[in-house]
Image: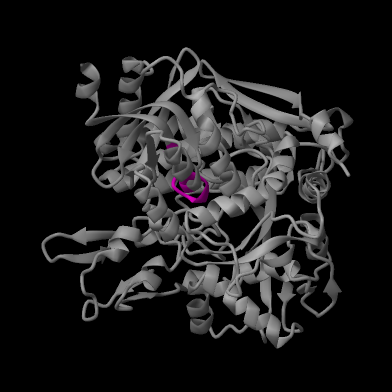
Amino acid sequence: MAAEIDYTKCNGCGKCYDLCPMDVITWNQEQDIPEITYPEDCWFCGVCWMECPKRAIDILYPACFW
Amino acid sequence: MSLDKTADRVIETDVLIMGGGIAGCYCAVKAASKGLNVTLVEKAKTDRSGSGAMGEDHYEPVPCDGVTPLEFVKLWQERQHDVCGDGRFVDLNIPYRLLDKATWVLDESEKIGITMKWTNGEYYHMPSGWFGGPRLMIRVHWSDIKPKLANAVRSSGVNVLERTMIVDLLTNSGRIVGATAVNVRTGEFIVIKARAVVLATGIFARCYEPEEPLFYKYQMKYHWCPASISGDGYAVAYRAGAELANMDITGWGYRIRDDLCISYGNFDHGDGIRAKWYTWDGEEIDYPTAPLYREIELKGKDPIYVSQEHLHDDYHRRMEVSFTDEKLISFKISEDRMFNPRKHRYELMENHPLNFMVPTGVYVNEDFKSSLPGLYAIGDCATGLHGCGNAALSGLWVGDHIDSNTDVASAPDIDEAQVEKQKKIALAPLNVSRGTEPIELELSTRYVCKRYVGMFKNEGRLREGQRRLHSLKREFLHKLMAKNPHYLMRALECRNITDLVEVHIAACLERKETRGQFIRLDYTEKDPSRDNMITIQRSENGQAVMEIREAPDLKPEYLKEEK
C-alpha cells in the first residue's frame, strides 16, 4: 500500500480526497471517510500526508523502490 | 439545440486555459483582471497540482550582476548546447523576453500577494544551476505557492473546472473555437466555447519510465506530477493541426537509488558548491553526461555515485530548507530508509531519457502564440520554456496581451459533428468491458520508447519501434476499457501518450545525425544541414506532416540594445 489512513485519527475533513494530484483517494459516502482506492497511481508526492491536519496518513515506501 | 443534447453542460467563455499549474494560474488571474471571462480547466485540484504541487524552492531567471537580455540569450544558448548540441532550436526572441520582462513578473506577483523575497525582505540571489556564473536564480519560500495561486484565481472570478480533462480542441475554418472535456470523477461531458485557448499543461515525459528503480506495482513515480506529464496539451494541439517542435530531443537523466532528487538537482550547482561524482571504487569523475556514463559502464567502473559528504554543515542546513520548500516528503522517506546525505552517496542507477527538453513542445513565437489562430501555449508546454519562472512570465504575458486577440466576431461557431465525434472517442472506454487496461497499453508504449528509441538510437531499432507502436495502437487503442471515469482519465492519457510517441519516433528517424545528447549510433557526425533548424510536425487531415525549418534569430532591434 502506498498511503495508509489511520481511521482512529482521521476526522473526515476530506482534504486528502480533495487535494490528491493523482486522484488516488475516493470518498466513502456511507461511512463519510476517505479511502485509498487507486494506490497504483500514487506518485509519493506526500500532499495527503503534509496536508492532513491530524497526521492520519502515512506514506509507505514499497520494496520495489527500496 | 442539439449541442445541449450531446453535452451535459455547455460553457461559453472568452479565454479557456487548459491546466491550472503555475503558468495557467498566472495567466487566469491576469486575463480576469483585464475584464475577460476566463475558464480554467484542471485535471486535479488547483491548490495542489502540477509541478509546483508540493512547493517550489527556486525561481529563475531574475536579472542580477548586470546581465543584459542579450547576454542572457547567449548563456541560454550555451546551456542548450550542453543538452541539445549546437545551433538554435527555438525562436531566440523567447529567451530574450524571459529576462527582459523578468522584473515585471516580480512586481506583478507582489500585486497578487505572492512574494519572491526571502525572510529578510530581500531577494536571495544565487548562481543558476542552469547558467552557472551570474546570479540569475533566486531562492523562494514557496511551499504554499499553489494554494496561494489557487486562491488568487478563485478571488479574481475565474470559472474553475477541477477534476476535468480536456479531450480535444474544437476547430472551425482553421481557428480554435473551444474544447470538449470530461469530468474524471463524474463522467460529465462538457463543451466549452472559447474565443481563445491557452495550453498550460506542462512537459511531456510519461512515454519513458519513471525515475525509480522498479515499477512493478507503482508505475507513476516520476520526478514531476504524472498527471501533468502525460502530454495532454501537446496531443490536443497536434490533433487540432497545431505545430509541435523538436519532438526528437529528449534529455537524459538517471534513475536515482535514493529518492531525494532535488538535492542532486540545481541547488548544489546553484549555490556555487558542486557535488562530486565517483566511480564505485572512489575515482572522482566529471559530471556524467550520457556518453560519459556509457563509457564508465563499458569500463566496468559503475555504479556511479553522487556525493555531498564533503559539503559543509551550513550547506546541508540550507539544503534542508530547500527540501522544506519543495519536497517535504523527502525528510520522511530518507528517515524511513535511514539515508543521510551528510554521510551517504546517491547512486545514479541508470542512464535513460528523462523527458522532452526545453526546445520541445507546442511551437510558439515570442508572444506564445501557436501556429493556429486562437491557440496559445505557455509554461513547459511551449517551446523554449522551462521551470516556474518561465511559466509565470509566459502566463502573465499571455493574460496581459490576449484581449487584443479575442475580439473576433461575436460567439465562435462550434461544429456539432466534431463535438459528436469527440464525445464518442472520449466516452468509448466506458462501454468496453473485456478489454485492455489503460496502464497495460501505457507500459507497453513506455517499453517501446525504452527499448527501441532510448539514449543510443539507430535506424533499425527506430523502425522496429515504429512498427510495434503502430501494431499496439491498432490492436489495443480501441479496446481500452474504463470501469469508471477515473480509469477513463487514464485511457485518455494513454491515447495522448501513444499519439505523441508516434510523433517522437518519426522525428528521431528523420534526424540522421548525432548532436548534443541526441545520439545516433549509425550517424555519429553532425549534419550541417540541420544547423539552426527546428523539426516541425503537425497533422493535416489526419496525415502526419514534417517540416525542417530555420529557427528565428534575434530581431535586429534586440541586437541593437547591447550596451
Query: Farthest residue toward the top?
Result: B173
Q: Quadrant of the C terminus of chain B?
A: top right
Quadrant in the picture for residue B458: top right
User: x, y percentage for residue B406?
Assistant: 47, 24
Q: Is residue A21 visible?
A: no
Compared with B296, B85 (above or below) is above
Which residue is located at x 21 percent, y 70 percent? Answer: A12
Left or right: B33, with B278 as reference point: left
Which residue is located at x 81 percent, y 53 percent? Answer: B67
Q: Quadrant of the N terminus of chain B?
A: top left
**Range covered by the magenta-colored residues:** B17-25
Numbered-mark total: 0
Query: Farthest residue toward the left?
Result: A30
Which residue is located at x 79 percent, y 36 percent? Answer: B88
Left or right: B244, with B136 as reference point: left
In depth, the one of B319 and B501 nearer the eye is B319
Q: Is residue B453 magenta?
A: no
User: x, y percentage for residue B290?
Assistant: 76, 56
Left or right: B11, with A47 as reference point: left
Quadrant in the picture for residue B343: bottom right
Compared with A50, B442 (above or below) is above
User: x, y percentage for residue B179?
Assistant: 39, 29
User: x, y percentage for residue B351?
Assistant: 69, 58
Q: Is residue B20 magenta?
A: yes
Q: Is residue B302 visible?
A: yes
Left or right: B111, with B308 as reference point: left
